[in-house]
């Protein structure tokens, strides 16, 4: 049963983390370059603009779910399973979601980079 | 971003291990973990990570930022060698090699791809009219 719980946790963590990343990326894409925003209008309007984004908070909400589900998973399973599973898989799902939902140009080179990083993180976190 | 992301995770893992296993029937006990100083330090690190992450995403693609920040694993391994004097085996070096190749591949990519979202073009059009 513990194995099942762990994998459910991993699934929730990966899905929620991806949803969170995509929503935060979407929010920041809509707001635009923060450095430029700050230079043109100042720090306070920039902070107000960021904090008034509903999409951003939706993203942070999902990140929170991923965070707590990761905590619960870490308390059950060893870091050598939870770490690679949630960290490495999120790279793949994020690249997929960036292409599907954010319409980013995830070309062959970016996929290759993602897969290399996935393998690297898998090896590093598993050992 | 790299430093605080990795250290936040490490601090959290340590804190959670100290407080022990969470019963599936008492999932709300997850909040008790928040009292652990390592968990607090971990959350603080992740907060700083979050701000840097958002700034990066404001001018770069998610599919660019994600692989690029994996360099934090390399940084943590180097830290564990030079600071904690840990032994790093061949398998971990292989992992590092993979990550370095991955980051090197994405580094040559343009920061931002895809259409500018409708909201941005609308704001820019409104500004030009002013």
Image (spheres, helix red, strand yellow):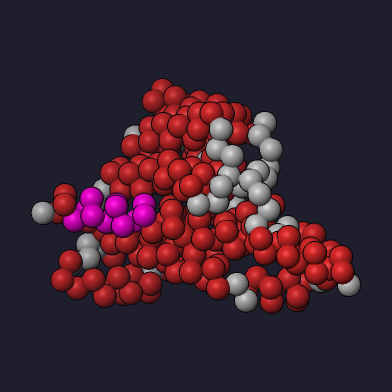
Closer-to-camera residue (A43/B17): A43
Residue beneath the point at 45% across and 32% down: A115
Q: Residue furthest left?
A: A1
Give the vertical position of B46 relative to B103 (above or below): below
Residue beneath the point at 47% across and 29% down: A116
Q: Is residue A90 left or right of residue A22?
A: left
Closer-to-camera residue (A88/A56): A56
Position in image of residue B100 (x %, y %)? 55, 29
Give the vertical position of A115 relative to B37 (above or below): above
Q: Which residues are magenta?
A: A5-15
Q: Is residue B63 left or right of residue B17?
A: right
Residue beneath the point at 54% across and 68% down: A55
Q: Is residue A15 left or right of residue A26?
A: left
Closer-to-camera residue (A23/B11): A23
Position in image of residue B73 (x %, y %)? 50, 40
User: How many marks can you see?
Assistant: 0
Q: Is any part of residue B102 visible from this angle? A: no
Q: Quadrant of the C terminus of chain B?
A: bottom right
Q: Is residue A66 left or right of residue A1?
A: right
Residue beneath the point at 55% across and 61% down: A24
- Residue A71 drawn in magenta: no
Examine the image and state in which quarter residue B88 appears.
top left
């Amino acid at each position: 049963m513990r194995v099942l719980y762990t994998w459910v946790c991993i699934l929730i963590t990966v899905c929620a983390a991806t949803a969170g990343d995509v929503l935060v990326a979407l929010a920041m894409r809509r707001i635009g370059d923060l450095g430029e925003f700050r230079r043109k209008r100042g720090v306070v309007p920039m902070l107000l603009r960021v904090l008034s984004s509903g999409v951003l908070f939706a993203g942070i909400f999902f990140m929170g779910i991923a965070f707590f589900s990761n905590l619960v998973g870490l308390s059950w399973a060893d870091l050598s399973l939870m770490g690679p599973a949630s960290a490495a898989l999120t790279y793949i799902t994020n690249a997929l979601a960036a292409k599907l939902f954010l319409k980013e140009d995830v070309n062959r080179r970016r996929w290759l980079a993602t897969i290399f990083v996935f393998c690297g993180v898998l090896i590093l976190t598993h050992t | 971003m790299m430093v605080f992301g990795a250290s936040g995770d490490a601090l959290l893992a340590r804190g959670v291990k100290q407080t022990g296993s969470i019963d599936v029937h008492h999932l709300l006990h997850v909040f008790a973990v928040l009292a652990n100083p390592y968990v607090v330090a971990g959350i603080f690190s992740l907060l700083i990570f979050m701000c840097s992450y958002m700034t990066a995403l404001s001018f770069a693609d998610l599919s660019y930022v994600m692989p690029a920040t994996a360099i934090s694993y390399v940084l943590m391994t180097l830290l564990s060698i030079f600071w904690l004097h840990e032994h790093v085996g061949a398998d971990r070096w292989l992992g590092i090699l993979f990550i370095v190749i991955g980051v090197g591949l994405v580094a040559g990519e343009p920061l931002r791809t895809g259409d500018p979202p409708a909201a941005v073009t609308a704001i820019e059009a409104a500004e030009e009219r002013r």
